Image (tube, helix red, strand yellow):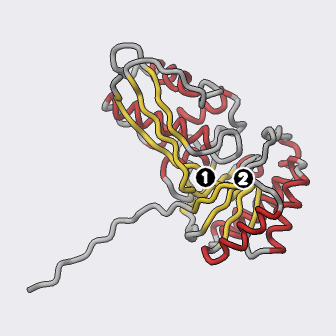
Amino acid sequence: MRLLGQGRACGGISLLHAVGCGNGCAAPIDLWTHVSLTDEPLEISEDEHKLLQLLLDAWKARDLPLPDGNLGWKINSNIPIGMGLKSSSALLVAAMDALSQATGVMISDAVCCNILSAIQIQSGCSITGGRDDIVVCNNHSTILVDVYDEVACRIKRINMPPMEVFLIIRDLEKSKINIAEFENRKTRFEEIVLDLVSGNPLQAFSKNGQLVGEAIGDKDALVICEDIEILTNGRAAISGSGPAIAVICQREENQKIIEHLKSRGLQFIHTRIYQYPELTWEREPWE
């Protein structure tokens, strides 16, 4: 078996649910999906919605070149699936990168976003298409997105501070979205947009979790989040439409968070906000 192309993408946690007001935002976390395009089919269990086949179909529909032979995929991921942590977007972004590397076809971020967004709607993974999720997985940065703008969906880059992240993994099915419940809270979701653009991403994170919990009727999640915020210095909120709950805190609060989660019998993963490395240039001193 030969690897023809490879790609990777990160997961994310929600700062603003896109169904609320048409804008969405997520912060990158240090969990990753790696995808390889191979020269022979492999059995994969991580693609319940057949996203990779839909991506190949979309690629062929645009008459883009593909390597010869029977193609397959290899997936290696530590992003929990179906938890609201952007696993579907990460899979598609990584697979698109693998296809591009294998064929030498370079696709702009805007076109990539349009293709993958259409696939997410077609597969039933997302109501809005998940442009905000695609952007965070692809750019590894926190960016406020207009999920209905097919040309220039990015509104503003958000400065998300480096923080520790605990992901509470609950053995529940993802909640079904009642759009009317989100529309009823549109004004409050729009307030979160103002928090983001004014430099308050942590406040946005907490508010969004509260509103999503109300909209999907996840009372247990709201109680868990309230306990964490009262009894520790962490902030807690549902990510996506759940069922995962994200807890963010400063590093010095790690032990307090860990002890609290263990005392409640909650299963969790410890990671961090991913900080995209910025290039810095240093001039050599003159001799």
Can you tell which quarter of the image residue 167 is in? Answer: bottom right
Q: Residue furthest bottom?
A: 287
Question: Could you tell whether 61 is left or right of 168 in the image?
Answer: left
Position in image of residue 89 (x %, y %): 58, 40
Question: Could you tell whether 49 is left or right of 42 in the image?
Answer: right
Nearer-the-camera pick, 133 or 172: 172
Q: Residue furthest top?
A: 69
What residue do we see at 67% from left, 75% from top? 253
Which quadrant is the C terminus positioned in?
bottom left
Residue 187 visible, this orientation: no
Give the CA separation, mark 1 to mark 2.
Answer: 8 Å
Q: Can you say whether 248 is above or below 11 in the image?
A: below
Say which element carries label 1: strand
Label 1 or label 2, whichever comes before in sequence order: 1
Which quadrant is the N terminus positioned in?
top left
Residue position marked by numbered label 2 in the rendering:
239
What residue do we see at 89% from left, 54% from top? 220
Position in image of residue 242 (x %, y %): 76, 47
Position in image of residue 22 (x %, y %): 71, 49
What residue do we see at 87% from left, 43% from top? 180
Question: Could you tell whether 147 is left or right of 236 in the image?
Answer: left
Assess whether mark 2 and mark 1 are in contact (beta carbons under 8 angstroms): yes
Give me the disc on residue 133. none
> How many tags in the picture?
2
Say which element carries label 2: loop
Residue position marked by numbered label 1 in the rendering:
12
Q: Amino acid at mark 2?
A: Ser
What residue do we see at 84% from left, 74% from top? 230
Q: Can you say whether 62 is above or below 211 in the image?
A: above
Q: Amino acid at mark 1?
A: Gly
Position in image of residue 119 (x %, y %): 60, 29
